[in-house]
Image (cartoon, rainbow, N blue to C red):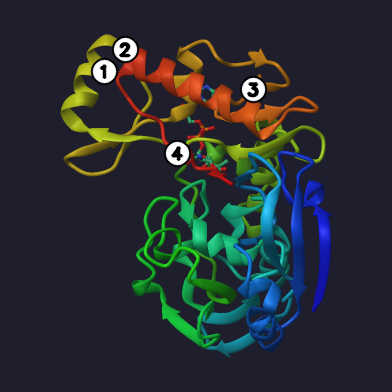
Amino acid sequence: MQIKSNFSLLAFNTFGLDVQASYFVEYNSVADLQTVLQSDIVKSNQMLHIGGGSNLLFMSDYKGVVLHSCIQTIKKVNETDAAVLLEVGAGVEWDNFVAYCVLHGWGGAENLSLIPGEVGASAVQNIGAYGVEVQDLIVEVKAVDVHSGELTVFQVDTCKYGYRDSIFKNELKGKYIITSVVFKLDKTPVYKLNYQHLEEEVLKCGMVNLQNIRQTIIAIRESKLPNPKVLGNAGSFFMNPVIPKMQFISLQNMYPNIPHYYVSEFDEKLPAAWLIDQCGWKGKQIGNAGVHNIQALVLVNNGGATGAEIASLAKQIQTSVKDKFGIELQAEVNFI
Ligand code: EPU
């Protein structure tokens, strides 16, 4: 365990905000984490656990302890003719795990290629893309109780997974720290290519296989989403809103081309990107914060922006979407 004081979080938030944590602690194992949780520094300060910082917006310096996992093991815990079960440390970079699965010919994670962040956070956020959510692969989540230090195993059906949502963002927020996640991967992959024109795009690489799906998704993401190392951002800033069918029908009467996704007979999901784009925000800049010029759902730090500037831009976008469409966008990004 290492404790650092007045630590810059620049490398730990993809918006590229130069904020400081009073203390920053990294640990390498469950036992190490249990020791950290007993330390005076943790007991006498507020605490924030971060992953890759790809979903965080720091409004100011963090007056407390920031924890980060360096548990980076990948262990095969079971194997049958059909599947492998892998226990993956919370500190493993998500996309390295996807690459590892694809390399071994194990299917399930390939559609989630190039999503930034780490494995622990993937299970909090229920990351998703191209028709797959991480909950589809999760068997169990292992986490340490912040107060008792006890290691608990959560079966996937107790994690209350929903769209970018889980028990760890709600009832158990701040109460547990995820240390590893057990995933089930298929030895005979079942390809999921229904999202928009994904299959067509994959076929341009030749045959449908895990490598080509990964390549295609990486290419799509790179063409639409700015690289946070070049232009600070946190991926989709808002969630795609789910609205009642009646409200959707009246919007569709006004905007016949409105894109939408079926949720249930009662609800429809709308792309926030489209709503924001229709309000004329794409490519706009206010101060040092801006709306990406290719994907309107991504807010960017054009250099030197503060968290407050980005938050103020987000607020203005929410207001205009509310005024034009009567829909309240909710942030996917966490404000700290
Ligand atoms: N669109 C616009 N203007 C834009 C961008 C998109 O009108 O500037 C329209 C597109 O034409 C399309 C619709 O909006 O009809 C949806 O766009 P896209 O397919 O790019 O997906 P999205 O809804 O913006 C979601 C996830 C992404 C995920 C992609 C692919 C959310 C909030 N976002 O984006 O997740 O990668 O689908 O599955 O659910 C993330 O969570 O950080 C993230 C990037």
Which comes before the other along the chain, label 3 or label 1? 1
Tag 2: residue type?
A: Tyr
**Of the residues tagged 4 and 3, which is closer to the observer?**
4
Counting residues from the start of the chain, the first of labels 4 and 3 encountered is: 4
Q: Residue under circle 3?
A: 294
> Which residue is label 1 attached to?
252
Whether the residues at callouts 1 and 2 have beta carbons within 8 Å, the answer is yes
Q: Where is 18 relative to 149, above or below?
A: above
Work out how far the residue at label 1 is from the one at label 2, CA to CA, in angstroms: 5 Å
Q: Which residue is mark 2?
A: 255
Q: What distance separates the C-alpha of mark 4 from that of mark 3?
A: 18 Å
- Label 4 CB-ligand 1 distance < 8 A: yes
Residue at horizontal 64%, vertical 76%?
Answer: 88
Who is closer to the viewer here, 38 or 81?
38
Give the alpha-carbon distance from disc 4 to disc 2, as whole Å: 21 Å
Q: Amino acid at mark 4?
A: Met
